[in-house]
Image (spheres, rainbow, N blue to C red):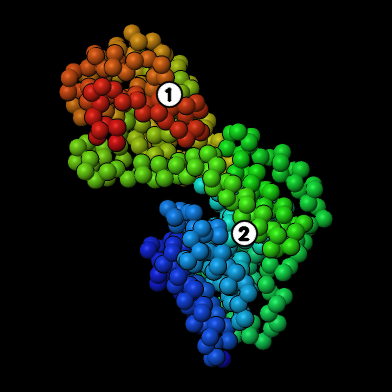
């Protein structure tokens, strides 16, 4: 008896083991080797001790989690169907992330073993698609329709202990070093057991009788269809089909809804935001030497002028980004109220367990306040967020131009006023480091900011 171990991290391009075409090709070749070897009696599929797989390589999304239009290449659906219908038992050994297509591979395996710290989930709605390789059909068959629906619609992952409790995995180990040895024991044991009843696609959804109630509740929780909710509705249609249709019909419905979400304007917008956020986190190398903020390795020192709702919200955003923030307002009561508002936001995060108490204390330790613009001699960036009056803003920027370092970037949160007119009060050298930076309220909640480039704003400032 031989247990054949497939570690597809050997073909992956990074530690997250994305299911790119080379990885899928490798998996397929290894599965075929195991299938045709007379000595192999069972198989283990693993991504190593760091990650199983964080899912699709989104840059090639059209062919990863769906029936690829290019029929000459191995799709994720091909891999998943091969695994579930494999003539020998397959055990998934899950460490780290098993997300999206990674979890769909694990769901197709006949047994699943994970570590305590493993994270499993189907977060596809966050990038404008739905699970497309059977995830909407197999997950409800394992953990129930109600739980699976909520997990898919909210993109909420689960850790090892919860996965074990729900029946998503068959065993759990506390340490990554124990994962493969435990999976080997399960693979040896699986050789002696009937295989067909372990094929998840042949099971029925345990709470299928509650499909109408589950559907009604889920529909009430969805975002409006015209405000980001179209993709969620596609996901709901697919997952509900698992309770009323056999696997092959459910898979067709899933593919139809995957395609609809993929091609929708909302789906494209989700993916645009996904890539834009990550690109913005990596300044262009050619620009890094053009401004100190782009090449800085420590915490930036910044200031926000105006302690109202918008100003304190912007200060919170900058604090969350790791900056040392000085909040400025010439009116003492307004300044105190702004500081209290930031404390209230932070304490709310702690109460909702979105932030630990030590993290909250560390964040608040980076907050300072002052009534004087003259105290901003040390900052690298200043955001103005005062009343929308050109005269007031010009006065503030005139002073800031005089007291801040020459390399300091000056930004205005204006939503309507002319950036170039504001810049006219600045020295010629400073005008290249001036731009609009318009946040949407509440600034610490809305993950959107509009950069307004002035006539003389440099590319390094925009970056």
Q: Secondary structure at mark 1?
A: helix
For residue 443, above or below residue 130: above
Q: Does 385 sit above or below residue 8?
A: above
Residue identified by numbered label 1 = 311
Q: Which residue is found at the position 80% from the left and 47% from the top?
A: 213
Label 1: few (<14), some or many (≥20) within 10 Å? many
Q: Could you tell me residue 397's position as x and y percent?
A: 28, 17
Q: Is residue 454 left or right of residue 322?
A: left
**Which structural element holds mark 2?**
helix
The residue lying furthest to the right in this view is: 209
Residue 246 in which image quadrant? bottom right
Q: Give me the C-alpha separation between circle 2 and circle 1.
A: 43 Å
Foreground: disc 2 or disc 1? 2
Q: Nearer the viewer, residue 47 or 69?
A: 69
Q: Residue at x 61, y 55 (%)?
A: 255
Q: Mark 2 highlights which residue?
A: 135
Residue 27 image offset from top left, x and y in percent: 48, 72
- Name the residue nearer the viewer: 337 or 100: 100
- Image quarter (top left, top right, bottom left or bottom right) of the C terminus: top left
């Amino acid at each position: 008896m031989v247990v054949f171990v497939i570690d597809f991290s050997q073909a992956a391009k990074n530690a997250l083991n994305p299911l790119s075409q080379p990885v899928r090709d490798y998996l397929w070749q290894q599965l075929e080797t195991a299938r045709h070897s007379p000595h192999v009696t069972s198989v283990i599929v693993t991504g190593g001790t760091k990650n199983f797989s964080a899912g699709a390589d989104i840059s090639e999304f059209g062919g990863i989690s769906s029936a690829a239009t290019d029929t000459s290449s191995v799709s994720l659906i091909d891999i998943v169907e091969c695994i579930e219908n494999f003539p020998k038992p397959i055990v998934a050994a899950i460490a780290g992330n098993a997300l999206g297509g990674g979890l769909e591979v694990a769901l197709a395996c006949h047994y699943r073993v994970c570590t305590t710290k493993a994270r499993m989930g189907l977060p596809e709605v966050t990038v404008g698609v739905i699970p497309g390789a059977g995830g909407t059909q197999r997950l409800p068959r394992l953990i129930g329709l109600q739980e699976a629906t909520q997990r898919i619609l909210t993109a909420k992952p689960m850790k090892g202990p919860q996965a074990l409790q729900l029946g998503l995995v068959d065993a759990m180990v506390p340490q990554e070093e124990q994962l493969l040895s435990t999976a080997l024991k399960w693979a040896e044991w699986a050789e002696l057991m009937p295989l067909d009843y372990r094929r998840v696609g042949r099971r029925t959804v345990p709470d299928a009788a509650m499909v109408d109630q589950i559907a009604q509740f889920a529909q009430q929780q969805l975002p409006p269809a015209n405000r980001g909710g179209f993709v969620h509705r596609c996901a709901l249609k697919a997952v509900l089909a698992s309770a009323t249709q056999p696997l092959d019909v459910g898979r067709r419905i899933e593919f139809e809804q995957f395609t609809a979400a993929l091609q929708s304007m909302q789906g494209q917008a989700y993916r645009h935001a996904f890539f834009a956020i990550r690109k913005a986190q990596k300044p262009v190398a050619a620009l890094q030497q053009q401004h100190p903020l782009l090449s800085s390795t420590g915490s930036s020192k910044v200031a926000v002028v105006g302690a109202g709702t918008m100003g304190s919200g912007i200060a919170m955003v900058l604090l969350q980004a790791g900056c040392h923030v000085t909040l400025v307002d010439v009116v003492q009561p307004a300044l105190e109220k702004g500081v209290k508002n930031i404390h209230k936001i932070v304490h709310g995060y702690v109460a909702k367990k979105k932030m630990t108490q030590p993290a909250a204390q560390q964040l608040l330790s980076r907050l300072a306040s002052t009534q004087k613009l003259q105290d901003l001699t040390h900052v690298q960036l200043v955001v103005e967020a005062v009343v929308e009056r050109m005269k007031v803003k010009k006065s503030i920027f005139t002073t800031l131009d005089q007291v801040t370092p020459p390399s300091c970037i000056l930004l205005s949160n204006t939503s309507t006023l002319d950036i170039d007119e504001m810049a006219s009060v600045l020295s010629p050298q400073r005008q290249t480091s001036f731009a609009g930076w318009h946040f949407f309220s509440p600034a610490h909640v809305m993950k959107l900011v509009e950069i307004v480039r002035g006539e003389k704003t440099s590319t390094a400032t925009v970056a």
